[in-house]
Image (cartoon, helix red, strand yellow):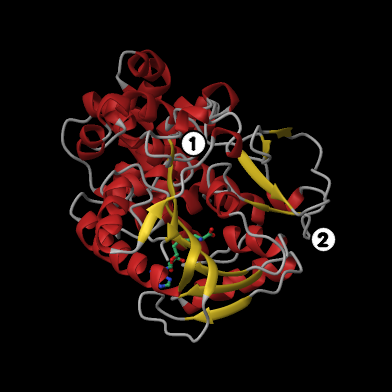
Amino acid sequence: MTDPTRDAAFALLTAVLDRHRPLEESLDALPAMDARDRAAGHRLAASVLRRLGSLDAVLEPYLTKAPPPAVRNVLRIGAAGILFLATPAHAAVGTAVALAKARGLAPFSGLVNALLRRVAAAGPAALEGLDGPRLDTPPWLWAAWGADARAIAEAHQVEAPLDLSLMPGATAPDGGVRLPTGSWRYPAGTRVTELAGFAEGAFWVQDAAAALPAHLLGATPGMHVADLCAAPGGKTAQLAATGAVVTAVERDPSRLARLRENLSRLHLTPRLITADAATWRTEDVFEAVLLDAPCSATGTIRRHPDVPHLKRAADLRSLTAQQDALLDAACALLRPGGRLVYSVCSLQPEEGQDRVAAALQRLPLRVDPAAPGEVPGLGDAITPEGFVHTTPAMWAELGGLDGFFVARLARRA
Ligand code: SAM
């Protein structure tokens, strides 16, 4: 008998590493199971993905020849339990052996047993001698992050806390701390559905950095606002909660369904449109547009440790072309004097400042710089141009925040 946590972790790792599917999507594709087992399996797979380079470096000296990928994943699960999740050695070894047998890998069960016993004995010391941040970061990202690479990669080594945005007037659930920008933070591993007020729609999950773009847009009651690329709807919720008249545009029907579900829990009713925002045509003219563009998501690696294993430098080319097309469309929706906030959860300059620099050349836009008072505690994140650029290395003493690039622009008359 395997235990459901390891079973789920194995299915998730196979999906991400061998079939190149996103972790969240793979989680949705798991067979029906107890919610706690599913969460534990997710956490175990995420630990493996977060520290994959280090895990492989610990295992490598014990391998005389490369094992099949499935065996390697069983070994990684067992080693992650021992090295990162404080699983007692006998439990980590026993469950890994059972997993190998259940997955048709019985001929390798002796290897799994012997190797994980050695990891339990010598792995912690071996791990200490490794450069984890470097080993766990793909070289193209390390190079692209320049002088900030080590600090960013160090922040990726640990699981991120849970951040919430509150509905106006709602009370934060117990056990959290209020961050300087107004988000509420709870320890990593907190299960949001178990917090008081979840079912009633008192809050939604949103990293503190992800709350900045809608905040900088400055929507007010009655203002006509377009939210382009809207699902799963964290920023739509922020905008709608101000009393603005929000039109949310999302291309993917299944993601729009999730947005609808999220917003209905919060009792918010923006207008929802299924469309490609780059080609969507409307008679409406908006006072403000939020464009949270699709991107490489390298700013969210601490929450989505599958990203480094799925994204390649070459992906940036098609993403930047989409971002340009979306910026053109966003600008066309704005009335003169109207405000546009462009954001990406990316640490790559090609998707952030380079896109805005190019847009300023070809579109009737000017920069409307962010002021330090608008992002309390994050003055360091404001660039000389007045953009906001957070990295996971900021707020280290508070538990970090996602990497975001946010530019506020205004349409010239
Ligand atoms: N704004 C969202 C939030 O705060 O929850 C997150 C948006 S996520 C970064 C990007 C979203 O854009 C995805 O849901 C994706 O399906 C959608 N998308 C990508 N290209 C699009 C396009 N051309 N038109 C509309 N939606 C698009």
Check disc 1 and give the amino acid type. Gly
Q: 244 or 178: nearer the eye?
A: 244
Q: Secondary structure at mark 2?
A: loop
Placement of 397 over or under 286, stated as above or below: above
Q: Position of residue 372 (x, y in %)?
A: 55, 33
Q: 167 or 149: nearer the eye?
A: 167
Whether residue 49 is visible here, answered yes or no, is: yes
Check disc 2 and give the amino acid type. Glu
Q: Which residue is mark 2?
A: 200
Placement of 253 over or under 390, stated as above or below: below
Q: Which residue is mark 1?
A: 94
User: Left or right: where does residue 410 sit relative to residue 371?
Assistant: left
Report the residue at 33% width, 36% height from top: 52
Q: Quadrant of ligand 1?
A: bottom left
Q: Position of residue 214 (x, y in %)?
A: 57, 54
Q: Residues within 10 Å of mark 2 (few under 14, many from 20)?
A: few
Q: Secondary structure at mark 1?
A: helix
